[in-house]
Image (tube, rainbow, N blue to C red):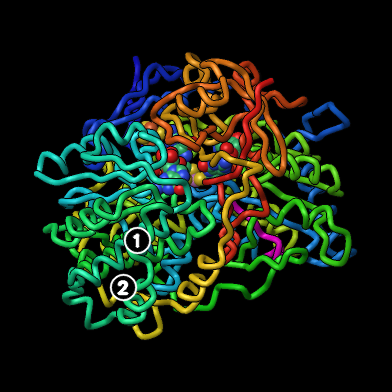
Amino acid sequence: MSEVHYRACNLCEAICGIEIKHENGVVLSIAGDKNDPFSRGHVCPKAVALKDIYEDKNRLKMPVKRFGDEWREISWSEAFDEIESKIKDVQTRFGINAVAIFQGNPSVHNFGTLLNSGALLKTLKTQNSFSATSTDQLPHHFAAWTMFGHPLLMPIPDLDRTGYFLIFGANPLASNGSLMTAPDIINRLENIKKRGGKIVLIDPRRTETARVASEHHFIKPSSDVYLLLAIVHTLFAENLVHLERLADFTDGVEILRAVSDEFSPENAESLTGISATEIRRIANEFGTAKSAVCYGRMGVSVQKFGSLCHWLINSINILTGNFDEPGGAMFTAPAFDLLAAAKPANIFNRWQSRVRRLPEFMGELPVAALSEEITTAGEGQIKVLITSCGNPVLSTPNGGALEKALENLEYMVSIDIYINETTKHADIILPPATGLETSHYDVIFNMFAVRNQAKYSAPLFPKAENAKYDWEIFQEISHRLNGKDKPLNLVPPEAKLDFGLQYGGYRLSLAELVEKPHGIDLGELKSCLPERLLTAKKRINLAPDLLVKDLERLQADVKNSDEFPFALIGRRHLRDNNSWLHNSERLVKGKNRCTVLINPSDAGNLQIENGQKIKVSSRVGAIEILCEISDKIMRGVVSIPHGYGHGRKGVRLETAKNHAGVSVNDLTDERVLDELTGNAAFSNVRVRLELI
Ligand SMILES: Nc1nc2c(c(=O)[nH]1)N[C@H]1C(S)=C(S)[C@@H](COP(=O)(O)OP(=O)(O)OC[C@H]3O[C@@H](n4cnc5c(=O)[nH]c(N)nc54)[C@H](O)[C@@H]3O)O[C@H]1N2
Ligand SMILES: Nc1nc2c(c(=O)[nH]1)N[C@H]1C(S)=C(S)[C@@H](COP(=O)(O)OP(=O)(O)OC[C@H]3O[C@@H](n4cnc5c(=O)[nH]c(N)nc54)[C@H](O)[C@@H]3O)O[C@H]1N2
Ligand code: SF4
Ligand SMILES: [Mo]
């Protein structure tokens, strides 16, 4: 007899409810859970990958140790003994910063890792802590910290009630939404239009999301800051600034008026490729809509002025009174609230990277500095690297340089389920139980959800014999490094969750959530300001000094050189998930997706034909890749997805190898950053195209 199990899919930020039919340890089907009040039965094609990961022959179940090109299974205790002695030895010989850690994206989709990695960081005490954050949403956090007092206090578009949705650099129809947990995004977007509202999309590519948008505007990559400044300028110039009740607790309006004065729509026109008339129209529509929300994601985060962009996006919402109000940008009230005990604190630039002096933020350094910190000799040089849930060789700017740098390490440990482009360099890989073998409560993405909700998923299957959960791995390593004499007392993440739920605003408990496997709807987002602000005086800062000052860098920005005439941007596909779902045959089959998109007129000028292989080069490297000619990409712009490049020797991903592709991060530049924060700038990487 088959049985049914309900859980949340944790592969992306949408946390869709899924219904899994299974029998005798075999998954028969995975479908949307119609009774999940949040996702209402929606799933995407990736949900089935949970079965594929569970069954994947290449997934590691026991620790493996590398002997040259060979990997041998070893016992957990042997692995932990070795790791403990190597880390202790290197920290004694070279100091605490000689041990570095990189945490990748699934860390935030993984309940056990999320609630336990902090203790390991505290134990290691290293200043060399890196993560995928500095290849992604760091500017969002930076804007939130400077304006609202905490990096996690990020406003979310109130999608289900807004009348005007202005999107910069996000493609939720492929990504399923980011920093906006909104399962069933397509219907939520369609509903805006059904309510008589409008969706305006700004993107250098006419994306999947453009299909549901009311209008789409091409923009020159990385010029958004000028458009945003021009919108702010117009709001002031045309009397569209109405802070309403926010005026009582907002500082800096006049500074923002003054600094935006010189950034007119006319000034933005040639820089962005969007006419001054259109910019004025958009600003007016936004400013007069009954409710409106401006939202920006990856495309405006990973650029040279990403932090300025996110400051201005928040500012547009605030200036027009579309902030902390229904239909605008709002804060969530999660059942498990990581901000419950948060206090204002300085979390920026308390230390810098050793070689390039890039600033720390939230206890982390920008990952763009990682390879030089490994290869540059001297006190504080990184000798040991721990990676967890990450694949920085494929995911970080100039991953090719990092790949070479890893060879210089004295020792490397990876906590991961695969031998991939990064972990193949490790001395030991520790594989946690994952996916259907684990429990899940989405601590992070419930904080960024368009409705408040709570859902706990129990494991479907027991973990493999002798396997360990990620939280067990973290606790064991921390315990050993702490040198405690007491025996290790393993504490599952459920203990913290139950405590957090009981002391949270809804007074829930784990037991209640266990009873409700479809999840509990806790209602729409509610106004909560000024109380929820975490700035010292509970006031919004519309003109943070650090951001206002960064406008000087914008003014000094130099023109692109002719040597690299094209602007390279990224692209996501519904059936990809960064670098790590390419071992699922169902997700990779079909047309080759690792291609370079090029506009027909550019292709014509260069005499490139569709399907032809060309060479794309940048300051840091070159790749050969097939062309896909498409009028969906703006002239002067080319697009290549990230997460490919599985053809490297020693990678043990049999299916992915057959769809290897090339890594765009062999082109991206670790020297071109949002210099204020050190965040990677994957948009507008300057490249040259050549026939081969
Ligand atoms: N050029 C370019 N580069 C980009 C981007 C881009 O748009 N363009 N996007 C950036 C963004 S937004 C991100 S978030 C990063 C992602 O970059 P990373 O986080 O470095 O890479 P992922 O591909 O997500 O790798 C996830 C790793 O986690 C492992 N894993 C999966 N599940 C588990 C688990 O339960 N436990 C453990 N321990 N490991 C697990 C997988 O095997 C894989 O090795 O890439 C960034 N890089
Ligand atoms: N299917 C799938 N879903 C995913 C992922 C995945 O790899 N695959 N990754 C997950 C992760 S880690 C993240 S962070 C989210 C990201 O979620 P999104 O940000 O929604 O996803 P992207 O597809 O990266 O969208 C960025 C958009 O910005 C555009 N863009 C590039 N440069 C510029 C620019 O200069 N200006 C403007 N205005 N736009 C620009 C790109 O053309 C692209 O359409 O997706 C998550 N969901
Ligand atoms: S949208 Fe995201 S959460 Fe939903 S099924 Fe797809 S991968 Fe899973
Ligand atoms: Mo990301």
The spot of residue 500 in percent (x, y) is 39, 62
In the picture of the structure, the residue carrying the numbered disc 2 is 532
Quarter of the image for the N terminus: give it.
top left
Q: Residue 113: within the magenta?
A: no
- Quick check: can you spot residue 433? no
Mark nearer the N terminus (1 vs 2) = 1
Q: Which amino acid type is shown beneath numbered disc 1?
A: Ile
Closer to us: 386 or 675: 675
Q: Residue at x 32, y 28 (%)?
A: 19
Crowdedness of circle 1 by 10 Å Cα count: few (<14), some, many (20+)?
many
Residue range (magenta) = 123-131
Real-space CA distance between mark 1 and mark 2, rounded to the nearest whole angstrom = 20 Å
Q: Is residue 327 left or right of residue 276?
A: left
- Quick check: can you spot residue 679? yes
Does mark 1's beta carbon lie closer than 8 Å to ligand 2? no
What secondary structure is found at the residue carrying circle 1? helix
Quarter of the image for the C terminus: give it.
top right
Quarter holding ligand 1: top right
In the picture of the structure, the residue carrying the numbered disc 1 is 313
Crowdedness of circle 2 by 10 Å Cα count: few (<14), some, many (20+)?
some
